[in-house]
Image (tube, rainbow, N blue to C red):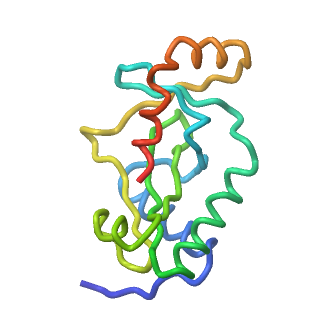
Amino acid sequence: MTMTAEPQSFEEAVARFEVFLKENGYSQTLIWVEPADLVLPGRRAIYVRVPVPSRNLEHARKRFVSGITEGLGVTFGTICDLPNATCCYAWVPKDRRQQQEHLMGPGLKISAKTDSSRVPGIYVANAIRWHLLKLRYRNRTEMTKDLFG
């Protein structure tokens, strides 16, 4: 087992995540998503609003810095696959208890869904369609938060 130093910057952490994704058959084109960007229709697919807000990348960066600085760690993980991109997230435990529950150290934890648990994403670029999907599946809104962390 080779021990590697923890990434010192968000860019270094993302580069490490991209290598991990490539090794596991994922696209290295990352789309950082938040719960508001997703709709769960109740079948094995996830609707993804595109384009996602540009601030999502900055949210991921802030979570990385916060998790590393506070010693709570940060997880980069996958949500779903789009045809040429991977929807992913950055998550930080809210406290030491949650850190322990998620088996996290003070550094970067990366994860990806296995082949049997990979979920396809469905692009939704039309704003009207997006609002109709959100309305139709509004009772599943809280479930999107379960995908993160």
Quadrant of the snapshot with the N terminus:
bottom left
Q: Vertical placement of 117 versus 22: above or below?
A: above
Q: Vertical placement of 58 versus 40: above or below?
A: below
Q: Quadrant of residue 51?
A: top right
What count of labels does the image hold?
0
Expressed as whole percent of the image width and height from the top left, the position of residue 30 reads: 58, 50
| Depth check, front residue: 88 or 149 | 149
Expressed as whole percent of the image width and height from the top left, the position of residue 120 reads: 43, 30
Expressed as whole percent of the image width and height from the top left, the position of residue 104 reads: 34, 71
Expressed as whole percent of the image width and height from the top left, the position of residue 129 reads: 66, 13
Q: Quadrant of residue 118?
A: top left
Position of residue 32 in the picture relative to residue 119 (left or right)? right
**Residue at the image position 51 percent from the left and 61 percent from the top:** 18
Quadrant of the snapshot with the C terminus:
bottom left
Position of residue 14 in the picture relative to residue 140 (left or right)? right
**Residue at the image position 44 percent from the left and 78 percent from the top:** 107
Q: Quadrant of residue 9?
A: bottom right
**Residue at the image position 52 percent from the left and 35 percent from the top:** 82
Position of residue 97 in the picture relative to residue 121 (left or right)? left
Q: Vertical placement of 44 versus 55: above or below?
A: above
